[in-house]
Image: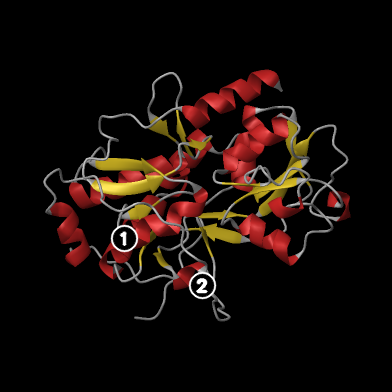
Amino acid sequence: MAGACVLTASLTLLPLSHSVEEDAERSPHRIATAVPAKADECEKPEASLPPSAADGPTIQKIKARENRKLIVGVDQNSYRWGYRDPATGDLEGFDIDLARAIAENILGDPNAIVFRAIPTNQRIGALENGTVDLVVRTMTINCARIQQVAFSTAYFQAGQQVLAPRDSSVTGYNASLAGKRVCTAEGSTAYEALKEKSFGAVFQDEHDEQPSDEDRLTVPNQLDCLVRLQLGEVDAVVTDNALAAGQAAQDPAVELRGEPFTTEYYGVAAKLGNEDLVRRVNQVLVGYRAGGDNSPWMTSYKKWLEAGLPGITAPPAPTYKNG
């Protein structure tokens, strides 16, 4: 695994460039971690506002900026989703393609965008304090999060799954996890799933043999889990199968085990109250899905994801709220 580990570390440590992706309008606020809200039961958290091409107050504010750029929170460490190509320094991936499509629709230029790399556990805080306009970062829509941020319609369907070394005794999300050290990202749906049912896995840092390392089992960024797996510091990772497929592509010594044990959807997230921006993103997604096998969505899927997640023939259909 040594060679793959070096590649992973290089992606983790590469900083954002200081050109288009620089913080052109530096926010005085620091990104804060939001405290998850208690959500009532909800039947369809993926239902979003109907699409609209209108320029509401949020979009007008974006267009009025001196630099006329959309500010988007992304990942730079998730291979094939949002990652920095070590050869070019450019951000690439499925989420990056979608973010550029939104910028092109709103501002007429796919490069009219400021990318801000944010950890998994700071996605909500970055929206709440205005550090970013949108988050396009493999963010799962669920009942708790819709109390904190506003989501677009679903643009991808994923599920939680286990990633483990090929020679591991772990067979999936089952009793084979008993006593195993399992890594997840802070604030992730994987961590919440293990809180509900862990099968005896060790997944919280306070139970680790070395509690002085606060990030040994719960880490800010999902890719850190792969590094820990490669170093033998954990025995398995639980994460979205979409992300895990990218990690397995980086390191052939690890693989997905068992079957996905959840069904969940990724959405583009905006600050609560910015309804015009959510409606506009949903309008973009209408066109992004259109065209069947030649749609922008399928073109991006074939380029970035098909090798690791074969067999997907169409994006998830949108679900809208009334009104």
Q: Answer whether labels 2 and 1 touch (C-beta < 8 Å).
A: no
Q: Which mark is residue 283?
A: 1
Tell which of 49 and 85 is nearer to you.
85
Residue 184 seen in the figure: yes
Q: Distance between the residues labelled 2 and 1?
A: 28 Å
Quadrant position of residue 299: top left
Where residue 78 appears, as percent x and y from the top left, is 53, 38
Question: Mark 1 packing: few (<14 Cα in 10 Å), some, or many (20+)?
Answer: many
Q: Is residue 88 above or below residue 170?
A: above
Where disc 2 sits, the SS reads loop
Which residue is at 43% across, 63% downward?
153
Image quarter of the N terminus: top right
Which residue is at 58% across, 43% downward?
222
Amino acid on which disc 2 is placed: Ala
Quadrant position of residue 88: top left
Q: Is residue 322 above or below residue 289?
A: below
Q: Name the residue under label 2.
A: 37
Q: Which residue reaches farthest front?
A: 212
Where residue 97 appears, as percent x and y from the top left, is 38, 41
Q: Which mark is residue 7?
A: none
Q: In this view, does 9 lie above or below 57?
A: above
Residue 310 seen in the figure: no
